[in-house]
Each structure stands twice: as C-alpha cells, then as structure tokens.
Amino acid sequence: MPTSGVRGPALPRDAVHALRGDVVARRSSRRLLLGSVAGVGAVAAVLFSLGARPVVAPSSHPAAVLGLLAVDGRAAEADAVPVSQDTVTWLRAHGWTFPQELPADWRVRAIRWSGDDRRVLEVELAAPSGTVVVTEQQGRLDTDALAGAPVRTVGGRQVHVLSTEPWLVAWQSEATVVQVVGTDGDEDVDAIVGAFPSGGYDDTVAGRIGRGWQTVTSTLETP
C-alpha cells in the first residue's frame, strides 16, 4: 500500500550552493594538506640522501705526510681562502669542525682546499714550537683500515697514531675525519686535538637531514 510522505520546505538555493561549496572546500583543503605533507616528505627524503657521507681511510704514506708539511709559499695558491673569522664561521656552518678557541699563542697561517675535487680542507697553524697542519674530510672514519695502529686517548677523544716521525694522528670529530701532523712531536698535536669538538658522527635521521641541508647551502656559496 503506498504511503504518503511529508516533504519539508525546500532549502533556499543559496544555502544549497553554500553546503556544496563547504564540502568542496573541505575536500580541497584535505588535498592541499596531503600534498603539502607529501612535498615535505619528499624534501626530507632528498636531504636524508644528501646527508650520507663516505667512509674515509686516512693516508699514512710518508710522501703524503711530508707533503702536508711542505707548506712554504703555498698560502698564495689559487685554492687558498681568506684567513678570517668570517671564513671560520662559514666552515662551521657548513659541516666542517674547528676549535672554538686555539691554544694560547697559536694562530691560523693559511686555509686552503686540496684534492682533485676540492673536498679536503687544509688548515696550516703556527704553533709556538713549529708548524701543525690539520686536514679534514667530511665522512666516517674507516677504523677497519686503521686496524693495528696504536690508539691514544687525548682529552676524551680516541685518536689513531699513524706516524711518529713526524707525529700524525687521525680521529672522528663530529661529521669530519680529522688528521693532524706536527713538526715537533706529540705535544703540539695533542694540544690542537684537545681543542676540537669532541662529538662523534651523528648517523640519526635528524643528523643526516641536517648534513643534507648543509650540502645544499654549501653549493650555493663558498668562502
């Protein structure tokens, strides 16, 4: 048996369009939010990938060690950069480690890039008793390649002794592998090792994303 229904009053046309518009707006906002989240995720993935660093095996070959100490007249090379606080600030901001303060009576004599791809940072220091050269490479220290090398603790840092004549050590300082060679034994070397940041390599997601961002910004400007 057919039943009869009672219809309520029809909604005004403007109200119908408003309701439809609200639904469309909500859907658009949801799509925008999902797109934004996906975009942020994609950027984070790219930065995470860029934040990976190679394994670095320091060289203890006599020719390489002596080459580091052959610094006379090299400060004016094309790969040299200005020795200034601005340069040091830029290096720190782009993933290179550097002491907050040098030991007393030390000074920076030269800063330069070396290597075929300019990925090695060299810092020549004048110590009270001689010359000390610091080299840095961004990466993780290959401790397997250094198996058998003596290990010393200097200011809480585990340093590998690669040579004693001249004195050469290597260790991990945050995101860089640092080597220090000195012309006057271990005292000067120990002094500068103790001045470097003591943190280790950060392989967390946040650490890698941070290094990825440093990679991006460092390609846009150089000291």
Image (cartoon, helix red, strand yellow):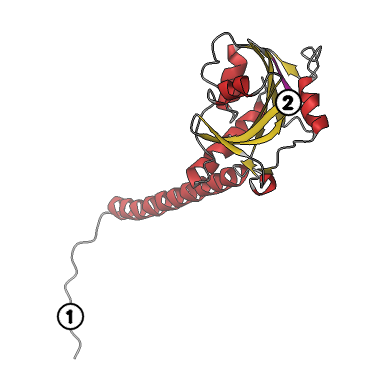
> Which corner quadrant of the image does residue 87 belong to?
top right
Local SS, label 1 = loop
Query: In the displayed structure, would residue 205 be above or below residue 211?
Result: below
Hey, what amino acid is under mark 1? Answer: Ser
Q: Quadrant of the N terminus?
A: bottom left
Query: In the displayed structure, would residue 18 be above or below residue 94?
Result: below
Residue at image position (60%, 28%) is 96
Local SS, label 2 = loop
Q: Which residues are magenta?
A: 110-114
| Magenta span contains residue 9 | no
Relative to 55, is 47 on the left or the right? left
Relative to 161, is 103 on the left or the right? left
- The picture places residue 86, in percent across and down from the top left corner, at 59, 14
Residue tagged 2: 166
Q: Nearer the viewer, residue 203 or 122?
A: 122
- Magenta part mainly helix, strand or loop? strand
Q: Tell me the crowding category of disc 2: few under 14, some 14 to 19, or many 20 or more residues within 10 angstroms, Cα based.
A: some
Which dot marks residue 4?
1
Q: Measure how far apart labels 2 and 1 are at the Cα level.
A: 105 Å
Relative to 208, is 2 on the left or the right? left
Q: Quadrant of the C terminus?
A: top right
- The picture places residue 209, in percent across and down from the top left corner, at 53, 41
